[in-house]
Amino acid sequence: MTVPACQLYLISPLDVSGSFPDRLARAVAAGPVAAFQFRVKDIDEHAAAALAAPLQEICAAHDVAFIVNDSISLAKRLGADGVHLGQDDGDVADARQRLGRQAQIGVTCHASRHLAMEAGEAGADYVAFGAFFPTTTKVTEHVADLDLLHWWANLFEVPVVAIGGITPANCVPLVAAGADFLAVSGAVWSGDEAQAVSDFARAIATGSQFRAQADGA
């Protein structure tokens, strides 16, 4: 089986209580999902671990990587597949030492080529650029553009994640420009999650065709 040129990377809403495990199960069953990032704020690690447990089981059952946002210690406690680090959440070397060689370690690089190159040199498994579009999920302080994706994809082998306000309607140029993953949250969880994942799958396929045509030109 060939790996598609770009894959979907789901990010949780801040509230993953109640019926959210059912919503996650629907989403990952609706189409190809490569990874799920567990992102909660302002709760202690014990409570976070309890919320994570059923979600981690769903991801494992569907062969979806379970990534913890920000916290190396929570990722280690859960035996997660990896951790995603913001610029103030620790460094790649520490995460690698504590989580092991197999852990997937991603780093937020905003719109900075310098930060991305530093992360790649430190051994990150992926770098994340954004925001590409306005988003209501978090405050937008940095704006990334397609040239940044082109530049990274053409020069480096470390996978690149595009994030920020991405929807099925606007993602095709990101895929065509070289994004390896689309990190999405609001576009999925603000409505019918299964329909959104299906819509993303179709849009990613279209973008991948444009990308293949450009590579063959």
Image: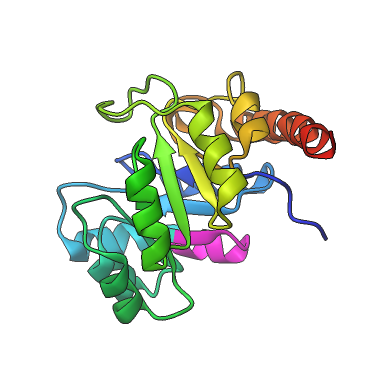
Q: Quadrant of residue 202?
A: top right
Say whether residue 4 is left or right of residue 185. Answer: right
Q: Is residue 76 magenta?
A: no
Whether 173 is drawn above or below 160: the answer is: above
Say whether residue 37 is left or right of residue 1. Answer: left
At 67% from the left and 31% from the top, the residue drawn is: 176
Residue 108: percent from the left, percent from the top? 34, 47
Residue 109: percent from the left, percent from the top? 35, 45
**Picture colour scheme:** rainbow
At 53% from the left and 61% from the top, the residue drawn is: 65
At 68% from the left and 47% from the top, the residue drawn is: 32
Tally of marks? 0
- Camera-side residue: 117 or 211? 117
Say whether residue 68 is left or right of residue 217. Answer: left
Check the picture and name the quadrant holding the C terminus: top right
- Res. 112 in view: yes
Q: Which segment is the magenta one?
A: 56-66
At 44% from the left and 26% from the top, the residue drawn is: 132
Say whether residue 111 is left or right of residue 141. Answer: right
- Camera-side residue: 3 or 78? 3
Whether 2 is drawn above or below 191: the answer is: below
Check the picture and name the quadrant holding the N terminus: bottom right
- Camera-side residue: 168 or 215? 215
